[in-house]
Amino acid sequence: MSLRAAARAIFDAALEAAQVRPLVLRSLARLEPPRGRLLVVGAGKASGAMAAAVEDAWGARIDVGFVVVKDGHVAPTRCVRLAEAGHPVPDERGARAAREILAIAGDAGADDLVLVLISGGASALTPAPAPPISLADKQSLTRLLLAAGADINQLNAVRKHCSVFKGGQLARAAAPARISALLLSDVIGDPLDVIGSGPTAPDASTFAEALGILDHFALRARAPAAVRERLERGVRGEIAETPKPDDPLFARVDNQVIGNNQLVVDAARARAAALGLAPHVLTRSLSGEAREVARQLVALGRDIAAGRGPVAAPACVIAGGETTVTVRGGGRGGRSQELALAAALDLPAAGHMVVLAAGTDGTDGPTDAAGAVADGDTVTRARRLGIDPVQRLDDNDAHAVFAALGDLVVTGPTNTNLLDLYLLLVATP
């Protein structure tokens, strides 16, 4: 098997391990059914698949069900209604969905159970702007933060303080009902208050932190006036904070992380070993600028090839996490494709290394690809087609390069979301 084929086989094994149905069913088996009604709500790229699994186990008990997913991430459900909305930039469909979820939660009584299904993408899919902030303001704010290179923790800290849904506020709306939230984590470290912007979790962030993030990226003056007004009023204590850990409402809230990147990394490690590659798990918390991370990965590959690495070739270095991209150009691509293109520029031409970077949700940035695969011949092949990979990287246009080469990793929506997977395969030179 070629290195490229091995890389794809390892990635496919990781995706299989990330399927949500068994994760949801195991969690429901440990959950006490309600004395009153069962209300199912949710948001995220995998929430449709999660809802379908809930129906398989508890379908006859569901009184009301509604979840919102990213466009195309639908699943076959019978009694839980699905809506599609915009991601990563929120839209009016998501705003309507957030209002409906809040209305369902607000109708819950003390004997009812509100089952909340949250996965990656939930935050963007449930914009609920706090007055005087408009949806257009939230859209503009999201674009500014993404383009500046804000990571998911920074993005969510700001969004929570511009919302009436996030940062524990869905739990506040559902009180005094019992709440059980099943969470698929697409966040490094699985912090409950960051997954989906923590709609059912105590919020550790503050108005001051949110405003500080705008200042860190020099965005305060460029942010919509209504956003500045709300954050500045919050810092002055004129607006109530999001609910904190000592709020008594959380006595009836149970947040369970039912799946995270560990599942993906473990499956990749097992498949690599089965293929005769020595697996080395670098980290489950990979972060940083995509092109800089790419250089570090290739440098590690060179060390392994030279016999100086942490494992002997043939080997597979495995990392989970989520890099970032500071957008300076006008091209298309996502963090995984940008990492693969940056790696291609550093990979030796000898042909004994392959890099695959892809998102477990099946999407990478505003493209139809999960990621891309690169090797020592990528740059040469691109130039034969008249493509300058250096210029394309400068323009954040990795998608055009890999599309022309046929080297995109395309899965379609996977109905799961457990961070990204980065693979570096090194053959014996």
Image (cartoon, rainbow, N blue to C red):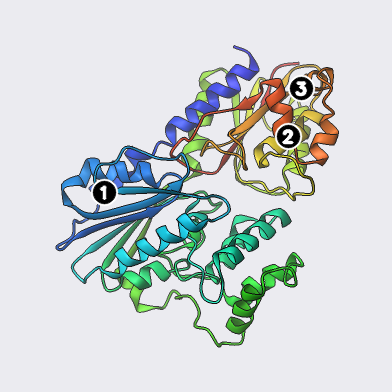
Vertical placement of residue 10 versus 390, above or below: above
Q: Which residue is drawn at 31% across and 49% down?
A: 81
Q: Tell me where residue 337 appears, x and y as whole percent.
A: 68, 35
In the picture of the structure, the residue carrying the numbered disc 3 is 378
Q: Which of 301 and 228 is in front in this view?
A: 228
Mark 2 = which residue? 398
Viewer-proximal residue among 89 and 38: 89
Disc 3 residue type? Thr
Quadrant showing the C terminus:
top right
Determine crowd level at label 3: few under 14, some 14-19, many 20+ residues with C-alpha closer than 10 A: many
Q: Distance between the residues labelled 1 and 3?
A: 47 Å
Which quadrant holds residue 272?
A: top right
In the image, taking residue 420 as reference, residue 102 lies left or right, namely left
Quarter of the image for residue 21 reads: top left
**SS under mark 3:** helix
Disc 1 marks which residue? 28
